[in-house]
Image (cartoon, rainbow, N blue to C red):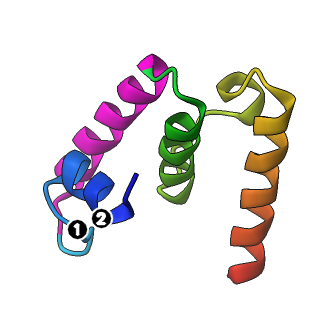
Amino acid sequence: MNFDDQLYRYFGSTGLDGLAPEVIAAGVEKMRVDFGLETDRSRRFALWSLLFLLGDAPDIDVAFADFADRDAARNFMELIEKAD
């Protein structure tokens, strides 16, 4: 999944700056629905990662049944924390 494509798909824009809060909320809701329906592990992880960056990701233990996916999510969280 290309990041810009993902943003455009859910928010109608490749940038979130200047979007109305309602547009962002609607996009996040669509992402959460798609996340719940997605069966491909890599796509689920990509959706979860963007939801995490937007502050609306489900808890790791709920989001991922596979321990490797949980570890990858924790590593992602740590990398984001270090980047800040």
Q: In x, y percent, where is residue 51?
A: 49, 47
Q: Are marks 2 and 1 in contact (CB under 8 Å)?
A: yes
Q: Is residue 37 above or below residue 60?
A: above
Residue 47 is left or right of residue 14, and the answer is: right
**Image quarter for residue 28?**
top left
Mark sitting earlier along the chain (2/1):
2
Q: Is residue 16 above or below residue 2?
A: below
Residue sitting at x 37%, y 24%: 33
- In the image, is residue 30 part of the stretch drawn in magenta? yes
Magenta: main secondary structure equals helix
Residue sitting at x 47%, y 20%: 36
**Image quarter for residue 3?**
bottom left
Residue sitting at x 78%, y 48%: 72
Crowd band around label 1 with a 10 angstrom C-alpha radius: few (<14), some (14–19), many (20+): some
Q: Is residue 7 above or below residue 70?
A: below
Residue sitting at x 83%, y 36%: 68
Q: In x, y percent, where is residue 62?
A: 70, 23
* Amino acid tagged 1: Thr
As measured in the structure, the alpha-carbon distance from the residue carrying label 2 to the one carrying label 1 is 5 Å
Residue 21 is left or right of residue 6, and the answer is: left
Residue 37 is left or right of residue 53, and the answer is: left
The residue at which mark 1 appears reads as 14
Location of the C terminus (image quadrant):
bottom right
Total count of labels: 2
Q: Which residues are magenta?
A: 19-37
Residue 57 tag number? none
- In the image, is residue 80 part of the stretch drawn in magenta? no
Crowd band around label 2 with a 10 angstrom C-alpha radius: few (<14), some (14–19), many (20+): few
Q: In x, y percent, where is residue 39?
A: 51, 20
Q: Secondary structure at mark 2?
A: helix
Q: Secondary structure at mark 1?
A: loop
The residue at which mark 2 appears reads as 4
